[in-house]
Image (spheres, rainbow, N blue to C red):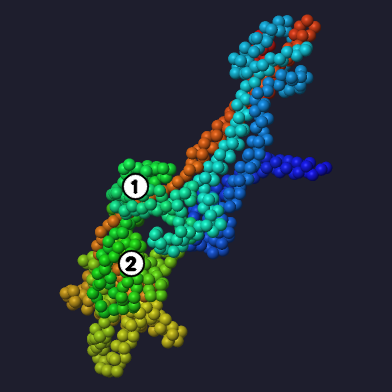
């Protein structure tokens, strides 16, 4: 075998492999499986989200496999290319044969071949052959067959063909797959993937202003064929930049025009949940004689120059907040008034050092489902906790806790509390500090109580008075014993102020033998409770309440709730409680902007695929042959037919054709 034949053989093997059905089905299954992953697993999210969801080990596995950007992965592109090659080879090899088959009536068929077919019938006739030809052709034409006649030396062949469009179904189906792949390539992020792979673009990971983003993380309108990004606009603002999330970073996509948000409107249900929202947009483009104005809403986008602008969300657009900062763990009771804007920050000087207050978000409504009891009492399925804001408090070392504070006191178990959630990272759930509201719905009594607890001189005097009164009842006058009890009380209140009951428990475990810890703890709790109660009575006295009378249920319950809150302040992590006093709400519109140049190509591929499948499955390709041959003064007729689908139905149809042709030729 020479070299040319070897090359031809190798090329033939490659063509045979690429055009094999097994290979094509394997590719389709792999692409389908990848598409399922890309649909179920949310794509292009920050890596931290994936780490939280899957853990470090599986995060690295999924990252290595490229599952966080399936449609932009090189292996997915390779699958599409192989599918295009496989389908293209099939079309190249089979289309010419199919097109010829659509035109060939096979008029050279042999009688012996017809007799071997499944659907065949033979008979004789005394009629004239010309009359039979005309009647048979007329009947076959009536049934939708195209016919041809050929005279041979000793016989004549009448051939009919119907449903040859079935062959085009194969071509359309395979060509549709190729067109779909081309559309997917144009609408995918393969271009960005290749540029990132070659180092021409590098996603930015720093939280910096858009004009400070380096050129390696910026895309001009010509740099990307397709993208899906988002932009948040405040009323009256405009922008020509879109942010594209790329795993743990982002890219800045420039637009060939600017988008201005003229007005944003949102309607709410009576429960406070959003009902509908829409934005009045203005497009500023040098190609326009005057700006284009249009209102967009959910499912009603604005499409301009191939860019689709969808109403996707809404959020805070930089609301102005008035905040009262109440100090914890100090005898200072005066709150500091702060004015700050959402998405901005400011430095605060506290007794615990400098902190940076970073306002992340503001929510006008917070809707939660009611409990069954609340449903029965109010008849409402949901309740609105009112306005709230989220913020971070960052210390000098850069460590920050995240907080979620509600403006208004919230009803919990029949009592009003100011709620403040705290968590150390986004992976944690908020743990809420419940600060009881006084009978005026304010923080004044609670803050006065905690301030008095941190005023050593006054607490010591309260301790002395309570010990003196107790010893007087017991007829005790030992001065040293009195001083020892007072010192114990002050030590306990100091520990409680520093770390709540946990700090007292730790001190007991450190200083007291294990077999006596329970008894000592019970004694300490009684002493501490006595001092806390007397201090609380002093707070009530300062409010003008006659403490000589019985304390009512509300004041008693307030005391218990306040002590529980004091015990949790140590774990709260903030030296200040931030109370939202007032706000000026400003909203922003979240607009999703997409560009899909391959969309129409993709639709064309879908149409071709649907038409092709319809042709292949619902159009039956049928052939009929009739051989008319003179024999012993009569005509010998042999009829046969074949169909590529629904053999049982074709057999019934052939029997009907045969009966009619036999009848007309007898």
**Mark found first going from the N terminus, 1 or 2:** 1
Image position of 332 with respect to 237: above or below = below
- For image coordinates 38% across by 75% down, the residue present is 396
Q: Quadrant of the N terminus?
A: top right
In the picture of the structure, the residue carrying the numbered disc 1 is: 284
Image coordinates for residue 610, horizontal then vertical, percent: 54, 34
Image coordinates for residue 328, horizontal then vertical, percent: 30, 75
Image coordinates for residue 233, horizontal then vertical, percent: 34, 53
In the picture of the structure, the residue carrying the numbered disc 2 is: 345
Q: Quadrant of the C terminus?
A: top right
Image position of 449 with respect to 83: above or below = below
Q: Residue 353 versus residue 430: which sits nearer the camera? A: 353
Secondary element under disc 1, as helix, strand or loop, is strand
Residue 123 in view (yes/no): no
Q: Are marks 1 and 2 in contact (CB under 8 Å)?
A: no
Q: Is residue 289 left or right of residue 508?
A: left
Task: Calculate the distance from the C-alpha at mark 1 to the C-alpha at mark 2.
Answer: 32 Å
Secondary element under disc 2, as helix, strand or loop, is strand
């Amino acid at each position: 075998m020479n070299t040319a034949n070897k090359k031809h053989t190798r090329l033939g093997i490659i063509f045979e492999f690429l055009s094999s059905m097994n290979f094509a089905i394997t590719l389709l299954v792999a692409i389908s499986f990848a598409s399922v992953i890309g649909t179920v697993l949310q794509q292009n999210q920050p890596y931290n989200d994936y780490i939280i969801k899957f853990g470090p080990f599986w995060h690295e596995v999924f990252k290595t496999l490229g599952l966080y950007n399936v449609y932009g992965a090189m292996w997915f592109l390779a699958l599409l290319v192989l599918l295009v090659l496989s389908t293209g080879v099939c079309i190249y090899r089979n289309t010419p044969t199919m097109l010829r088959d659509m035109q060939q009536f096979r008029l050279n068929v042999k009688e012996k071949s017809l007799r071997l077919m499944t659907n065949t019938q033979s008979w004789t006739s005394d009629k004239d052959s010309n009359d039979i030809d005309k009647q048979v052709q007329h009947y076959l034409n009536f049934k939708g067959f195209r016919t041809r006649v050929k005279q041979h030396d000793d016989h004549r062949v009448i051939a009919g063909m119907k449903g040859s469009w079935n062959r085009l179904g194969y071509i359309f189906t395979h060509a549709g797959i190729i067109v779909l792949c081309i559309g997917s390539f144009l609408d995918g992020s393969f271009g960005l993937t290749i540029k990132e792979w070659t180092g021409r673009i590098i996603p930015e990971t720093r939280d910096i202003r858009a004009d400070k983003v380096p050129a390696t993380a910026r895309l001009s309108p010509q740099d990307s064929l397709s993208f899906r990004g988002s932009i948040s606009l405040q009323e009256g603002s405009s922008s020509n930049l879109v942010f594209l999330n790329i795993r743990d970073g982002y890219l800045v996509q420039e637009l060939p025009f600017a988008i201005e948000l003229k007005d944003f409107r949102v309607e709410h249900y009576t429960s406070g949940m959003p009902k509908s929202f829409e934005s009045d947009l203005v497009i500023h483009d040098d190609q326009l004689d005057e700006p284009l104005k249009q209102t967009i809403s959910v499912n009603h986008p604005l499409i301009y120059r191939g860019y689709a602008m969808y109403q996707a969300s809404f959020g805070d657009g930089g609301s102005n907040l008035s905040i009262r900062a109440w100090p914890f763990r100090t005898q200072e009771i005066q709150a500091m008034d702060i004015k700050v804007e959402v998405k901005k920050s400011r430095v605060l000087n506290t007794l615990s050092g400098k902190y940076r207050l970073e306002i992340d978000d503001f929510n006008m409504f917070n809707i939660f489902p009611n409990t069954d009891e609340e449903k029965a009492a109010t008849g409402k399925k949901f309740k609105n906790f009112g306005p709230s804001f989220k913020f971070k408090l960052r210390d000098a070392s850069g460590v920050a806790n995240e907080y979620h504070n509600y403006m208004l006191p919230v009803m919990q178990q029949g009592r009003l509390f100011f709620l403040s959630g705290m968590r150390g990272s986004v992976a944690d759930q908020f743990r809420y500090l419940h600060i009881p509201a006084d009978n005026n719905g304010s923080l004044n009594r609670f803050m006065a109580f905690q301030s008095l607890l941190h005023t050593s001189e006054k607490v010591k005097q309260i301790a002395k008075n309570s010990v003196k009164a107790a010893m007087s009842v017991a007829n005790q006058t030992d001065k040293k014993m009195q001083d020892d009890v007072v010192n114990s009380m002050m030590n306990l209140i100091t520990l409680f102020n520093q770390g709540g009951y946990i700090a007292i428990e730790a001190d007991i475990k450190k200083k007291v033998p294990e077999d006596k810890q329970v008894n000592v703890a019970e004694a300490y709790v009684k002493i501490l409770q006595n001092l806390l109660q007397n201090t609380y009575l002093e707070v009530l006295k300062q409010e003008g309440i006659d403490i000589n009378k019985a304390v009512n249920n509300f004041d008693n319950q307030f005391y218990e709730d306040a002590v529980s809150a004091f015990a949790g302040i140590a774990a709260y992590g903030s030296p200040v409680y931030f109370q939202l006093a007032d706000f000026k709400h400003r909203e922003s519109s979240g607009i999703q902007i997409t560009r899909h140049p391959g969309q129409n190509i993709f639709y064309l591929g879908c149409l071709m695929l649907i038409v092709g499948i319809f042709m292949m499955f619902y159009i039956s390709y049928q052939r009929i042959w009739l051989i008319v041959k003179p024999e012993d003064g009569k005509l010998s007729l042999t009829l046969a037919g074949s169909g590529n689908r629904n053999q049982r139905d074709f057999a019934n149809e052939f029997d009907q054709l045969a009966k009619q042709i036999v009848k007309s030729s007898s």
